Amino acid sequence: MSETPSRTTGRTRRHAVLLGAGLAAAVLAPTLACAQTELLNVSYDPTRELYREINAAFSEAWKAKTGETVTVRAAHGGSGSQARTVIDGIPADVVTLGIPSDIDAISRISKKIPADWRTKLPNQGLPYTSTVVFLVRKGNPKAVKDWGDLVKPDIKVITPNPKTSAGGRWNFLAAWGYAYEKEGKNADKANAFVGEVYKNVPVLDTGARGSTVTFAQRGLGDVLPTWENEAYLVFEEFGRDKFDVVVPPTSIYAEPPVALVDANVDKKGTRKQAEAYLQFLYSDQAQAIFAKHHYRPLNRAAAKPEDLAQLPELKLFKIEDLQGDWDAIQKKNFDNGGLFDQLSKAGR
Amino acid sequence: MSETFAPVALAEARPASVVTEGRWIRWLLIAVAILFLALFLVLPLLTVFAQAFAKGVEAYLAAFTEADAHAAIRLTLLTAAIAVPFNLVFGIMASWAIAKFEFWGKNLLVTLIDLPFSVSPVVSGLIYVLVFGAQGLLGPWLLDHDVQIIFAVPGIVLATIFVTFPFVARQLIPLMQEQGTAEEEAALTLGASGWHAFRTVTLPNIRWGLLYSVLLCNARAMGEFGAVSVVSGHIRGLTNTLPLHVEILYNEYNFVAAFAVASLLAGLALVTLCVKSVLEWRYADEIAAGARGH
């Protein structure tokens, strides 16, 4: 042991060099493939199939117009968690999220999106809208017809966690709005009704897609209130002989907005392409694709009649008309200590 | 790991007559154990392959022709190719220092090496988001210098290194401790340099234990889900490793492809298991500390 000190220092130095080399490799490795322009669209859960088609169509249209090859990559997850990844620094060029308050959150916390993002694109940044309908087991054995049926004692409702999922928030707000109108605009009774609904919820997944898999693949629950597009997608994926779509008489006007992430596109030098991508969402070609995937296009004239026929007429209410602006809606219902927290505490 | 050998030693130490339970109780216990294994290990494994081939071999192979699948396989291999050698070097360094030298804070170092085993993978991922994320400790500096760590390959590699940190060191420390410093000291007295002694004496002594630990380290590096999921950002074709790709395919109702890719991971696990068993059977003494007489 007598000569150990000198031996260790020599060895330590050599290993320190190795360590440094390893770290350098780890840091440098990522910037390998960036020869062509790439856009990143950070989106919410159920839009995977939609944006696969939109992204391919945009790349083709952009190539035809400018000769430049642009690859649009997509990341999907619960809308709230996706907003969080943008805040934490994912290099998104555009966000296409499920609910306006998630883009507000990015703007408020990270300042990467200006606060007046709604004014930058037509229709408040909404190239399409949607609503919430019910997916039930074939033949509707529990006879679910309207929101009021969700509080029946023998009904199990599958819905995602409103804290992380935009779809979960629309379901929550839709149930609230239904009860509010029905009870003669009594907010207390509407709160109580929503509490009753969530007592029938056995499992809260983090995203709309997770809830769909729980309901359709794992066979849990009697009714899945979900995005209209998601309900029809299950139809196509699992076969129409297993499920029915029930359209309630009233539902919510669901607003999944899109926005440019200004700070990121300026840093990456992709502003031109990213803006063109968002404009493309308002083009006739994209509008037709929205309708094909069961989203409600802004410009109905661009969509195929048979796709429009799949989008039934129903009475839609805007939650802003009942609860005020989005800051107020988010704070009242979903922030820490909001209505959802109070209800889950009371439900326990 | 070395714990595997404890029951064997116990059984040998105890004479057979001590077991007073009747024959049928013993059979019942064995049957329960086998049933349990079949239900919770073999059945799920078979399900993976059954689902993967549910729509025929063509559909199975189609899952691997997709560009996103290729990207996931490449990223997984790259991650393991960086994380495993890193842990190998670090593991040898750390266990060398701990086993052969006395220094202040040694116990603390041993405890720290064990930390990743006791921390939940989600937390392992989150700490990197909290340190390197845009809102994190180093976030603003990294942003100014155009270094992307979280939601890119470096973050995935870092998270993988963190969770696989203990594998090599934990295996080698007891082995090296048990071997002592006598052989190295002999080499040094005979005029070998430190590096020479390490290469010709220490390394051959630990080679099988080292290989064994690298094997386990690699299996975990390729299969890690939790920590990587937190730092990945799930960008298709860019930051999805194989386990994350499986989840995405499953969520897209692409069950055949999901299970096909999962079968690749299951295959990796089976190969690991086989090589591990061979190593244990052939070189048990050199892998496990304490069973070896000098």
Image: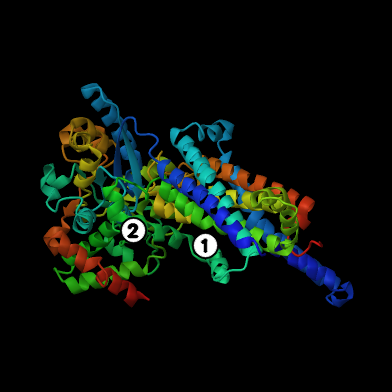
Determine the image quadrant of residue A337.
bottom left
Residue at the image position 64 percent from the left and 55 percent from the top: B41
Number of labels in the image equals: 2
In the displayed structure, B258 sits above or below B29; it is above
Quarter of the image for the C terminus of chain B: give it: bottom right
Hey, what amino acid is under mark 2?
A: Val
Residue A12 location in percent, x, y?
54, 55
**Frontmost residue, A264 versus A94:** A264
Q: Is residue B96 left or right of residue A248?
A: right
Badge 1: residue crowd in 10 Å (few <14, some 14–19, many ≥20): some
Q: Look at the image and tell me whether residue A222 can be seen.
A: no
Read off the chain for label 2.
Answer: A
Residue A238 location in percent, x, y?
44, 43
Residue B25 location in percent, x, y?
80, 72
**Frontmost residue, A254 versus B91:** B91
On the image, numbered disc 1 is attached to which residue? B116
Residue B87 location in percent, x, y?
55, 52
Residue at the image position 18 percent from the left and 32 percent from the top: A283
Q: Is residue A23 left or right of residue A57?
A: right
On the image, numbered disc 2 is attached to which residue? A144
Residue at the image position 78 percent from the left and 57 percent from the top: B285
Quarter of the image for the N terminus of chain B: give it: bottom right
The secondary structure type at the circle numbered 2 is: loop
Hey, what amino acid is under mark 1?
A: Pro
Badge 2: residue crowd in 10 Å (few <14, some 14–19, many ≥20): many
Whether pointer 2 and pointer 1 mark residues with C-beta atoms closer than 8 Å, the reply is: no
Colour convention of the picture = rainbow
Q: Which of the two marks, 2 or 1, is nearer to us in this view?
A: 1
